[in-house]
Amino acid sequence: EINGNLALNECYDVAIYENDPDMYLIGTHDNSTFKHTTSTGWDQMAQGDGGICAIDKTNTDRLYGMCNGYLIRSTDGLSWNWCYTGLHVGGYNSPFKIHPTSSNIIYAAYFDGSLAQAAIVKSTNYGQSFDLTNHVGTEWGYTTAFDVSPSNSNKILFATYDVWNGAYGNLKLTFNGGSSWTSAESGLQSIINKAQITDIYYQRNNSYTAWICFGGFENGKRVYKSTGSGLYWSNITYN
């Protein structure tokens, strides 16, 4: 044994408060969610398996995370409660997002058992409740990633992967907040059905530029970039 007093943890996700880089959350495997600040150091915030986490940039007491596959939140920066109890996100690390300009709006991945489909659902009261009827978007399979453009919140990229009806992926795009969707797979034909999209990121000040990452074992097909809002993609893996 050579690690001595080195404490290690398997970290799923990190959320950093943009106005204070010493304040952040981490979601860990089997070891809950932790909060770090310069004044308190590390505090264990929630039990169970952690996961994706987020900090409200308008109120640092308002925190979000995952616990054993369920979305949780804190309104005082100390204690955690379940978000809307009817929300079954569909996986331990199903994504969720805080609206880029209206922090009361939370988007979350949801698995609609009645339709056997992945969905994006929306809360307008900081995650206290979600509208599970009027979905922002739906698709077969389960949600692997989505992102809402910070500079134009009507643009959302939504990725799913269906393992029940034969493995295949799907990526689509809305220009109107979910009222209608279009395929966003141009340039991805050789990879979209072989690996899952693990992350999507819109450039902060440019809704036309976005990046996606693939998992899996397809060499040379990991990172793709779009300069057309997501309608077409170029492989930049080795750039």
Image (tube, helix red, strand yellow):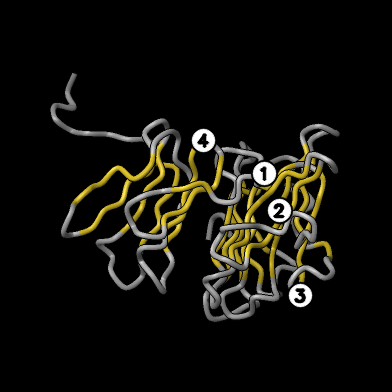
**Front: mark 4 or 1:** 4
Quick check: marks 1 and 2 in contact, CB under 8 Å? yes
**Front: mark 4 or 2:** 4
Q: What residue sits right under mark 3 in the picture? A: 175
For label 3, the SS is: loop
Q: Earlier in the sequence, mark 3 or mark 1?
A: 3
Quick check: marks 3 and 2 in contact, CB under 8 Å? no
Q: Is residue 31 above or below residue 77?
A: above
Between 80 and 221, the one lying in front of the other is 80
Between 213 and 59, the one lying in front of the other is 59
Label 4 environment density (alpha carbons within 10 Å; few <14, some 14–19, many ≥20): some
Q: What residue sits right under mark 2 in the picture? A: 159
The disc at residue 196 is 1
Give the alpha-carbon distance from disc 4 to disc 2, as whole Å: 22 Å
Residue at 63 percent of width and 77 percent of height: 207
Give the alpha-carbon distance from disc 4 to disc 3, as whole Å: 33 Å
The disc at residue 68 is 4
Residue at 67 percent of width and 44 percent of height: 196
For label 2, the SS is: strand
- The amino acid sitting under disc 1 is Gln
- The amino acid sitting under disc 3 is Phe
Give the alpha-carbon distance from disc 3 to disc 2, as whole Å: 15 Å
Q: Is residue 171 above or below residue 56?
A: above
Decide if residue 195 is on the left or right side of residue 200. right
**Front: mark 4 or 3:** 4
The disc at residue 137 is none
